[in-house]
Image: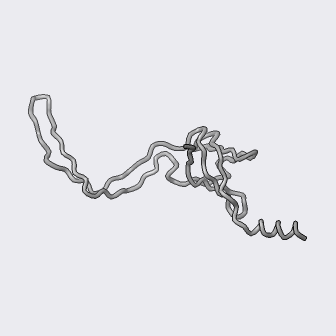
Amino acid sequence: MLKIIREQGAYHNPPPIQIGEVISPPPNIKIRVGDLQLDRDDVLIADYLLADYARQIELKNVTLQSTLSTVAEHTHTIDSFQINQANLKLKDTLKTGDLVALLATADRQTFIVLCKVVKT
């Protein structure tokens, strides 16, 4: 009876976050979690972990100052230049050996790569 209660309790508890190791980077990602190897069909990856992830960002109170010189010894000075918005495009992605936090979906058929984690 106790075994059945434990099994039913475990069934309704959310799966724990697990740590996996990237053994092959995207786009053909492979991740090892214990004795299990996941491939690209088994995982969903947080968008910011992929190469060429882009976001629009807002900048407040950013002012640049510069002096431009040309070959003909002619100089232009820019007193100030204000930036309010910019696009940020990340070029890096997960690499072989990176550790990632993984969360299994309720049916435990798909794993979500939440973030890259590091040891300090």
In the image, residue 97 above or below residue 1:
above
Residue lying furthest front: 120
Please tell me in which quadrant of the rendered image residue 94 appears.
Answer: top right
x, y (%) of residue 115? 56, 52
Check the picture and name the quadrant holding the N terminus.
bottom right
x, y (%) of residue 15? 70, 61
In the image, residue 43 above or below residue 76:
below
Please tell me in which quadrant of the rendered image residue 12 appears.
Answer: bottom right
How many numbered marks have been drawn onto this rendered protein structure?
0
Taking the spot 62% from the left edge, 43% from the top edge, the residue there is 28
On screen, residue 68 versus residue 84, left or right, reads left
x, y (%) of residue 14? 69, 65
On screen, residue 54 versus residue 45, left or right, reads left
x, y (%) of residue 18? 67, 53
In the image, residue 2 above or below residue 28:
below
Taking the spot 48% from the left edge, 42% from the top edge, the residue there is 92
Taking the spot 68% from the left edge, 57% from the top edge, the residue there is 110
On screen, residue 88 versus residue 2, left or right, reads left
On screen, residue 119 versus residue 52, left or right, reads right
Check the picture and name the quadrant holding the C terminus.
top right
Image colouring: one colour
Taking the spot 72% from the left edge, 63% from the top edge, the residue there is 107
